[in-house]
Amino acid sequence: MNYNYLYLFFILSCIILIGRAAVQPIGQACEVYVEHGAMPTNQCGSYKNPCLNVKYAIQSCGQSNAYVVVYFIDGPHTDIGNFNQVFVNQTIVYQAVNIGKATLDMTGIKTPLVTISDTSYTAGQSTDMYANFHMNGVNVVNSNSAASIIQTMVNLTQISVKVDQCGFYSNVGGNGTVFNLKTHYSERQTSTTISITNSSFKNNKGVNGVVLYAQSTDNIYINNCVFYGNSASGVGIINPDTISLVTITQSNFTSNYVQSGGVVHFDSMQVSPVVSSNRFDSNSGGGVRSSAIAMLTTTGIIDNTNFTNNFNLSGVLVYSSIWVNITNSFFTGNNLPQFYGAGVYFEKSGILIYDSVFANNYALYGGAIYSITNIVYTYIPLIKNTIIEDNNATISGGGLFTSGITLKLTNVSIENNLAANGSNFYCLGSQVYTNNTEFLSYTDNAYDNELGIMCGSSTCSIKDISVLVDNEIGCGVYKPPAKKGLTDKEKIGIAVGISSVFIITVIIIIVIIRKKHHHHHYHSIRGGH
């Protein structure tokens, strides 16, 4: 039984329950319409007599403003009264009349679109506070401000934020250009849910967590979203730092850029983040420790996710984790020319890689997988039921590079990888145990063995535990090239050559002398007659 799937099922069940437990509005909603160019009055709200902006629309509801649905009629909405709305103890819904046809244009606006805040709370005030903000089918464009578009600043409030079928395009900001969630300063742990579904985030720019930056106790759920062309000068297009649950499913990350860290960057989380059924394609990074997914967490799950054609970043980076599971995933065509592990880089971590494929990846070291330095952790790194083939490293470990770790390889095919040293596997100070694992090498590297394995030190041990005796797998051992100058053999050869020339020369001289002497004697005899 795959316990990974049981855990994933449990997590998704929790999300459903959390969603159902979120505060629901009581009573009939006040429904009002907003249209650009309408009359500036709060005596408005019907489809035929719409309000100019959100401010007037909510005011038009009077005492019934605890639950308001604002319908945006097609077209751009630019009036300043649409922005800088602050909610608490309210349920506010922004709904496009026609999905994708209404756009909030924030050109020139230096405030957030929406803030959920209870920072005005005073001692003795009721702590039974809530805020629900839902947005459906509305686009938000051209924000250019240090302020985020949707932000939360709550200490006591139970909140629910739901964004569905929306688009956020060409916005520029700092941390959390689109979403900036702050609830971890709470006097008591809040129960909050952030749900982002069926939405697009394109060409947004910022510092950290361009689309989502969270320092919170929020449960965050992202499903079926598109992240395209976003750029972070710091860490992360998505950067949650939360003690609660984060789940990202069925989403595409394409052509995004991060200077460092992950396109999705998990940091200091206490609950396993779940990344399932996603695609990371053609993203790029600053290079050193950049990745599509960075797991700097205690535990984590990556399942059924593809990493293709990414440049200057690893597919997955794992650091100081007890365990991270990577299952049913593909790493192909990733290029990390100046760093290590184009497919997976893990350090000081117990990593479990099952049922995955690494092919045609390229790095400086560890074309497919690079691992370094054990610490005490619960799980020994294990790679199982996995194919590692046609990967390339400039220097060492075309398929695998290990340094100072214990590693198990079970039912793994490691074939036709290339590197200057250790075409299939470069092992440095590591203990490696193989079981039903096949190495096939078609290169003739001088210091690899016939399996394409090279050991960088005598402390490396590779054993096939599927056999009881003679289970040590030998490996090539690196020998540095000789110093410049002639070898002893070359010196002896030259000496022999010189001696031979000398001897031959002496013989020729003797022969010439003897011939001259013989000719003189012949003439002497002739002259005597």
Image (spheres, grey):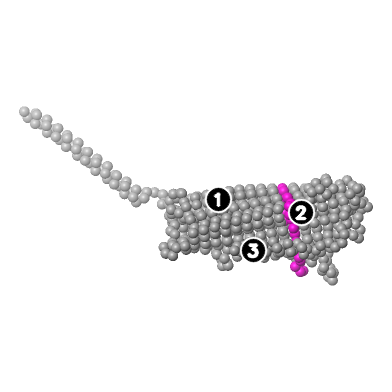
Callout count: 3
Can you name the residue that lies furthest to the bottom here? 124
Instruction: Return the x and y of residue 386 as percentages of the image width and height.
Output: 55, 56
Residue type pointed to by label 3: Leu
Can you name the residue that lies furthest to the left here? 529
User: Where is 35 relative to 431, above or below?
Assistant: above
On the question of residue 33 being in view, the answer is yes
Relative placement, left or right, of 245 versus 495 is right
> Which numbered disc flags the more N-terminal residue, 2 or 1?
2
On the question of residue 107 being in view, the answer is no
> Looking at the image, which is closer to me, 431 or 166?
166
> Looking at the image, which is closer to me, 272 or 126?
272
Whether the magenta-drawn stretch holds residue 191 is answered as yes
Whether the magenta-drawn stretch holds residue 427 is answered as no
Residue stretch in magenta: 186-212
Say which element carries label 2.
Answer: strand
Instruction: Return the x and y of residue 416 as percentages of the image width and height.
Output: 49, 50
Instruction: Return the x and y of residue 470 as percentages of the image width and height.
Output: 41, 63
Residue with the mark numbered 3: 6
Residue with the mark numbered 2: 164
Residue with the mark numbered 1: 359
**What separation in Å lies between label 3 and label 2 (alpha carbons)?**
28 Å
Name the quadrant containing residue 61. bottom right
